[in-house]
Image (cartoon, helix red, strand yellow):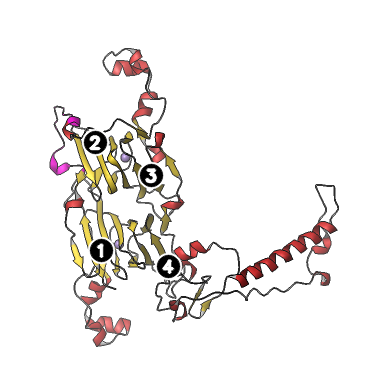
């Protein structure tokens, strides 16, 4: 971009000259120099200096010159100096910018012509979240909640890492917790109100659920673990959990001694003074049976298990464009409000246009690059871009599609607060509506309408 450099250099020199003039003209040796009134308003002596801001070099992605309503995805990789231009609209941007944002978010820089009006933000890259650091390099977490997606009132998410042997300390919270293991393996345990116990080992692709208030802990097995946590409260924060360490530190030692049947006060001499959150621990025994503790209420019955080995289940739907694996209370009853789909979309393929009738959707991108187009009624529509590690949020009833716009498979999770996973498929809806109504409404030909399908397609091949 040598010519651009030239323009920039000229601009800098111009700015320097202006500063110099101002400095020379101003009185020195005082911290409160009077502002020269000759700079106020119109003054023929202050004529503008013309700068050719149109003279910037750039190229356009092929889809930028199409009619904007075609709205194809734009690939700015290898495009010189991407510009906010789509069809006959937009214009060049000579100004301050960070090109990497534009390459990552082509539908923000040059939206499809079908975008219109305003739609609440539906996207948060966890790469922009503050990381909460664990102790002793045992791990970390970062979260998305209403602070970064204000519309996300029903659910919040956390990405957490535990290195081998690292604990997420014993804790509980006011929200219910649903989790999907992203990589590695983990031992999870809990005790419920009846005194029933639970312990299990999970690996990538498995799911757990802890009801609100039920205390639990997590420990990474050999090789460590990373998992996604989804809470049924958009204002959830990892900072506002109830912790075993704090409970013991915040009750008088005399009360602790009495509570545990007259133990000496010295029993509590070495308890932590505050939260451990994430900390290194003794590696979990290989044999899980060594950590099975059973009281008179026994272990949690299998039909109420807090874990589901989803990695071992086959996809619910396989299509030419990808697959969908559904997990909901029909197979995982304890998670009575969590219904989710793990969706794989091949390059160029599309998770078909649909909406959810009973719940907002919280989503998370495990791999690939995608865009989601949201139609929000009252003429409003907006397109958002997503990459691995990004969270998304789509309010109830707003239609959306998820299009793979990269070269790798997109894998993402749609999470609903619902007793089963469901959607209205636009393809199926119009396919099952009397053709005359569709033709009159959308001004379509009989030959177009006759090709509509009567079944959901879930993921349509590109
Ligand atoms: Mn938890
Ligand atoms: Mn959806």
Circle 4: is it few (<14), some (14-19), or many (20+) Cα within 10 Å?
many
**Residue at 26% of width from left, 15% of height from top?**
261
Asked if 328 appears above or below 212 in the picture, the reply is below
- SS assignment at label 1: loop
Q: Distance between the Cα atoms at labels 3 and 4?
A: 27 Å
Residue, disc 3: 236
- SS assignment at label 3: loop
For ligand 1, give the image quadrant.
Answer: top left
Q: Main secondary structure of the magenta part?
A: loop
Circle 2: is it few (<14), some (14-19), or many (20+) Cα within 10 Å?
many
Whole-percent x and y of residue 110? 48, 71
Q: Does any portion of residue 250 appear in the rendered image? A: no
Residues at discs 4 and 2 in contact (Cβ within 8 Å): no
Is residue 300 on the magenta stretch?
A: yes
Mark 4 vs mark 2: in front? 2
Residue, disc 4: 382
**Residue at 24% of width from left, 48% of height from top?**
207
Residue 148 or 67: which is nearer the viewer? 67
Q: Distance between the Cα atoms at labels 2 and 3?
A: 21 Å
* Quadrant of residue 349 within the rendered picture: bottom left
Q: Quadrant of the C terminus?
A: bottom left
Residue, disc 2: 189
Residue, disc 1: 423
Task: Tell me how many marks there are.
Answer: 4
């Amino acid at each position: 971009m040598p010519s651009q450099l030239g323009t920039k250099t000229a601009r800098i020199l111009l700015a320097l000259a202006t500063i110099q003039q101002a400095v020379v003209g101003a009185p020195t040796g005082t911290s409160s120099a009077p502002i020269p009134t000759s700079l106020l308003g119109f003054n023929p002596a202050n004529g503008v200096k013309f700068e050719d801001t149109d003279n910037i070099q750039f190229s356009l992605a092929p889809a930028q010159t199409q009619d904007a309503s075609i709205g194809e995805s734009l690939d700015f990789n290898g495009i010189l100096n991407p510009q906010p231009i789509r069809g006959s609209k937009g214009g060049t941007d000579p100004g301050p910018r960070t090109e990497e944002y534009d390459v990552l978010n082509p539908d923000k820089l040059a939206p499809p012509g079908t975008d219109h009006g305003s739609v609440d933000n539906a996207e948060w890259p966890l790469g922009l979240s503050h990381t909460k650091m664990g102790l002793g390099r045992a791990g970390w977490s970062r979260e998305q909640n209403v602070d970064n997606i204000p519309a996300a009132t029903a659910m919040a998410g956390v990405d957490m890492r535990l290195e081998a042997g690292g604990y997420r300390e014993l804790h509980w919270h006011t929200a219910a917790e649903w989790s999907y293991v992203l990589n590695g393996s983990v031992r999870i345990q809990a005790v419920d109100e009846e005194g029933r116990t639970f312990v299990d080992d999970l690996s990538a692709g498995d799911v757990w659920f802890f009801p609100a208030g039920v205390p639990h802990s997590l420990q990474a097995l050999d090789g460590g673990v990373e998992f996604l946590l989804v809470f049924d409260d958009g204002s959830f924060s990892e900072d506002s959990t109830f912790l075993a360490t704090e409970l013991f530190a915040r009750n008088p030692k005399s009360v602790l001694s009495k509570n545990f049947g007259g133990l000496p006060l010295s029993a509590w001499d070495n308890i932590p003074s505050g939260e451990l959150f994430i900390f290194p621990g003794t590696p979990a025994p290989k044999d899980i049976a060594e950590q099975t503790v059973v009281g008179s209420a026994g272990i949690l019955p299998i039909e109420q298990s807090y874990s589901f080995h989803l990695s071992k289940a086959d996809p619910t739907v396989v299509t030419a464009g990808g697959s969908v694996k559904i997990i909901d209370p029909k197979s995982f009853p304890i998670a009575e409000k969590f219904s989710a789909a793990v969706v794989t979309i091949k390059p160029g393929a599309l998770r078909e246009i649909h909406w959810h009738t009973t719940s907002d959707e919280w989503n998370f991108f495990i791999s690939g690059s995608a865009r989601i187009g949201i139609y929000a009624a009252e003429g409003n529509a907006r397109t958002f871009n997503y990459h691995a590690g990004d969270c998304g949020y789509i309010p109830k009833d707003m239609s959306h599609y998820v299009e793979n716009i990269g070269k790798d498979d997109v894998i993402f999770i749609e999470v609903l607060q619902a007793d089963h996973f469901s959607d209205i498929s636009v393809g199926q809806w119009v396919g099952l509506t009397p053709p005359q109504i569709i033709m009159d409404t959308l001004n379509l030909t009989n030959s177009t309408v006759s090709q509509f399908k009567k079944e959901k397609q879930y993921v349509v091949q590109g």
